Amino acid sequence: MTKVSKGALWFAIGVVAVVTIVLYQHFGLGRLLTLESLKASRDALALAYQNQPWLTLGLFFVGYVAAAALSIPGALVLTLAAGALFGLWVGLLVVSFASSLGALLAFLSARYLLRDAIQARFGKSLAPINEGVRKDGVVYLLTLRLVPVFPFWLINLLMGLTPMKASRFYATSQIGMLAGTAVYVNAGTQLAAIQSPSDIFSPALLGSFVLLGIFPLLAKAGVRWYQERKVYARWPKPRQFDRNLIVIGGGAGGLVSAYIASAVKASVTLVEGHKMGGDCLNFGCVPSKALIRSAKMAKHLHKAADLGFTGTHGTVDFAAVMRRVHRVIADIAPHDSVERYTSLGVDVVQGHARITGPWSVEITRNDGSKQTLTTRNIVIAAGASPFVPPIPGIEQTGYLTSDTVWGLTELPRRLVVLGGGPIGSELAQSFARLGAMTTQVEMTERILVREDPEVSELVSASLRADGVDVLTGHQAVRAEVVDGEKRLIVRCGDVETAIVFDALLCAVGRSARVSGYGLEELGIPLTPRKTIETNGYLQTLYPNIYAVGDVAGPFQFTHTAAHQAWYAAVNALFGRVKKFSVDYSVIPWATFTDPEVARVGLSETEAIEQGVPHEVTRYGIDDLDRAIADGTAHGFVKVLTVPGKDKILGVTIVGEHAGDLLAEYVLAMKHGLGLNKILGTIHTYPTLAEANKYAAGEWKRAHAPQTLLRWAQRFHAWERS
């Protein structure tokens, strides 16, 4: 549809709207669409229908279509009028088609006038809704039609903004509104028979209103029953179960799920095929932070003269560094051990789990024995594994990943790190500080692309200062061995460059583990990002099977896996009483480079892309007393707020201990506290946490009441006179 035709349509709708408002207000159309008016004019309308039935039906049909299309209040009265004038079956026929046609017109108006603009501006935020409508739009719409929690006119307009086909919308509306229409039309037939107040309490009328009250509940239960029956159709349900819950995976998500189940005295089995503690303990958070600590000490030794030390020497013993890394893992491991969780009442099995049905799991233990358990619920917490890009020749040259790098005992002399995300940036900086000649290759134009450009620039500068050769805008083309020398060929534009290396570390991300344990056989679908598709309650296609952590997304953080695990475990064990939708409103994360990068909520870039109105307040940590004393006076605190208000939309902190400093803002956002509350909180002096107070002070200074201050100035001048 062209802009001209859209303009013409807007004009036509405007004319109709003006005419409708005039009729509704000036000529008393609104007074006609009331129950009292209907009762008063019932006899005259009935006589008109008796004398000219087709004309009356036609006019009523057109009027109902117009009322539905323009969302005029009074649709209920018109529906009751149909029952009162035409009887149940004729009234049902007329209203059913008129209401569906009017809804379609409203749907099409929203589609052609608003959808393109709305999708262009909020497309990223609406992407999950669009995908859900494409897949299950009929079910969503049918549920909304059967369970009228939201006004039908609002549903008509909102669905017009989605990808749903108009024909599908009309057919679903025709079917979905039929039952509710029948109830209202039937109520209208009873209202037509009222002669005195005592008639209100007739059994038929009371039955109509009772049905009106319980119908939404029955409809919702019916839709849910039908969906579950369809999903479970080919799976016989056991008469009794061995377990209340089986958890697959012993990482953060699995451990928390099992812990909660045992705490509420449920029978729970936790199956882990490799190492308890999962990726975080053994290959991710714990070893990387131990390595970062050693690398930071190496940096401090190089800067000792700045702190007044002379003659300070330090030689990196890389083997000793890696022994410490594994010692740290061993020291933390008891927190996640088989022994601990067994003592808590969890049945911990070391082996491989395979889901053989919605209520059964086959377990192959590490000793080769097999066992099949039935269970009411299953939580999948299988985690993720490093993604290795399909670079030609990479298998011949060999490579490391964030899982295997911890097996090194000698420091690579020349290291290439593929990936400019958090993992790649942390490891590149650490190995460079420990003495490796490190090159970081990132195909996009900057590292840490999820953060604001100024964050990327600051961290890039720090990495380069530590000796990392940061190559952004470079794509790995192939790996090769020439005369016994390993080389990675990268391309920037039309120019290819060879990078010689002794070790190649792939750190370009992690892929959810979604194969090998029965998802395919059960037909559990995946998202476009190759994670398990779940709803807001973390349920998969089968409502009793849940997914949490990296395998479910949308975040690959240990703390979000634990967060999801609470919801999954509670919903699984008590969902028939009460279910909770997982809350992603305040999710923090941090990248532990030096300087650290920590964020919660929107970044400035995201706010601009999503069209979110915002103000930016910035405080430079180079002005902070404690940072100056510590020699860490670099970085900033950046806060996004609602224009004119202190409500926090997002915070980015770059600097020493940024991850720790962020906690105050996470608490504030979670509980609806604004910058005024942070400013009014006493912060210990001298600490890095004062940066949060000073950032709030910057906001307050920018929003000082200027008019009041001018009056205060006059008052003080008067007092001096």
Image (tube, rainbow, N blue to C red):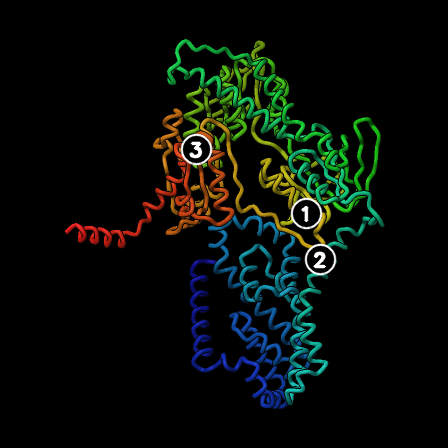
Q: Establish if 542 lies above or below 38.
A: above
Q: Could you say which disc has been placed on residue 570 in the image?
A: 1
Which residue is found at the position 77% from the left and 40% from the top?
355
Report which quarter residue 244 is drawn in: top right
Q: Establish if 622 lies above or below 553.
A: above
Dot 3 or dot 1, earlier in sequence: 1
**Relative to 518, 371 lies left or right:** right
Tell me the kind of residue under disc 1.
Answer: Val
Q: Nearer the viewer, mark 3 or mark 2?
A: 3
Tell me the kind of residue under disc 3.
Answer: Val
Report which quarter residue 617 is drawn in: top left
Judging by the rendered image, the residue that carries numbered circle 2 is 224
Element type where label 1 sits in the image: helix
Tell me the kind of residue under disc 2.
Answer: Arg
Judging by the rendered image, the residue that carries numbered circle 3 is 654
Report which quarter residue 86 is drawn in: bottom right
- Residue 280: horizontal and vertical position, in percent? 62, 30
The answer to whether mark 3 and mark 2 are in CB contact below 8 A is: no
- Residue 386: horizontal and vertical position, in percent? 62, 29
